[in-house]
Amino acid sequence: MRLPKPRGGLSEWVVARLADAGAAGAAPAADSLEDEALALWTLHELSYRGFEDADDHAEWDPEVLHVRHGLEVALEDRLRSRWEAARPVAGDLPDDVPAALEALVAADDGPSLADHVRRRADLDQVLELLRQRSIYHLKESDPSAFVVPRLPVRAKAALMELQYDEYGDGDPNRLHAHLFARGLEAAGLRPEYGAYIDDAIAENLEMNNAGSLFGLHRRLRGAAMGHLAAFEMTSSIPSRKMAQGLDRLGLDGPMAAYYDEHVEADAIHEQLAARDICGTLAEDEPDQAMEILFGAWTCLDVEARFATAMLASWGADR
Amino acid sequence: MRERDFDHPEVVLCPDGPMLLRGARSVQDADGTVHPVRRPVVALCRCEKSSRLPWCDGTHKVIPKG
């Protein structure tokens, strides 16, 4: 993947700095939330697959890390203040984390892109949604993989049981990110990693940044696992709707098969994530219980913001 | 703290949810059809409302709890 097109002064600075470590000058303030989100997305990408036109040393360059840190603090503050404003009972530690996760997911009333795809979306809208989703699905499960060494015994074993399935149970052909790439190709879209980063809307970048922020910081391991649980717990039924919508539009084949696979896989994963990962983590490290709920709520919230923006852009929000 | 052994059952009945089954190579459904298993863990439907029996598809979550 090549460095993305800048969307303001800060992302322009980041792209220039990653392309050439000698590029002079201090980082400017961001011009917008979109500029800020793209800058952080680009910096986080250095810890995944990187860019062919960036210097690989930049990942641990103190000057670059300083900018990344500032952006991460701002993002975390924003996510936490949204959670503080929304959370129903302040200061109450849940004693049954899997049940609390279930209640949180059941109370989620965000708009559903899968409902729209199943019933009403036209082909252009679905292709646009797939381009947006490719930003995450082509690195599917990778943010959670960073968390493995940071967990106690039971949660670690359970996360590996889940991740093993995400990564194809040892078969590269069944690795979920690869299934999505095959689906993109069959739908006439570009399957290469990061191909559509310049199309990603600000809400999509923030959604991806939240997952990376949680995954990359040991301190945020509880939030990362809560995020994973909420993601898996809201995947099976929407995946079935996505597959039905794709069928309706004649996109049956590899892309529908990708969503089909997730109906079955995520019905398993949601149980593992809520009970064996988050439940045991909260038992072993009780101070993580509220963090798990913060991560789970944030997962639902950033998806709702993304869905709201997509539906509004299609005039489908009424 | 002493190191201890953990419960890790092959069969887990999830409250208001599916039955998790670890280490199976095939599963026979109610019609007698045998389904090969390609995953280390599968979730078997217990509410009988799944659209892809014998596997769970999450439908139990939209059924009111009795």
Image (cartoon, coloured by chain):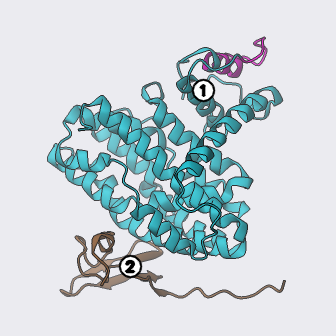
Image quadrant in which the N terminus of chain A is located: top right
- Write the residue at 61% across / 26% down: A39
Residue A52, horizontal then vertical, whole percent: 61, 26
* Chain in brown on the image: B
Front position in the image: B13 or B32 = B13
Name the amino acid type tagged 2: Gly
**Label 1 amino acid?**
Glu
Is any atom of residue A175 visible in this view? Answer: yes
Q: Residue B17 got which mark?
A: 2
Residue drawn at 71 percent across, 25 percent down: A55
Q: Quadrant of residue A201?
A: top left
Answer with left or right where residue A282 lies relative to residue A64.
left
Residue shown at the point (43%, 48%) measured from the top left: A178
**In front of the other: B58 or A19:** B58
Q: Horizontally, is A282 left or right of A135 in the view? A: right
Q: Which residue is mark 1?
A: A36
Bin the neighbour count of mark 1 within 10 Å (Cα to Cα): few under 14, some 14-19, many 20 and up: many
Separation (CA) of disc 2 from disc 1:
42 Å
Specify the quadrant that holds the C terminus of chain A.
top left
At mark 2, the secondary structure is loop
Q: Is residue A33 above or below residue A155?
A: above
Chain identifier, colour cyan: A
Q: Give the percent coordinates (x, y) of residue A169.
A: 49, 65
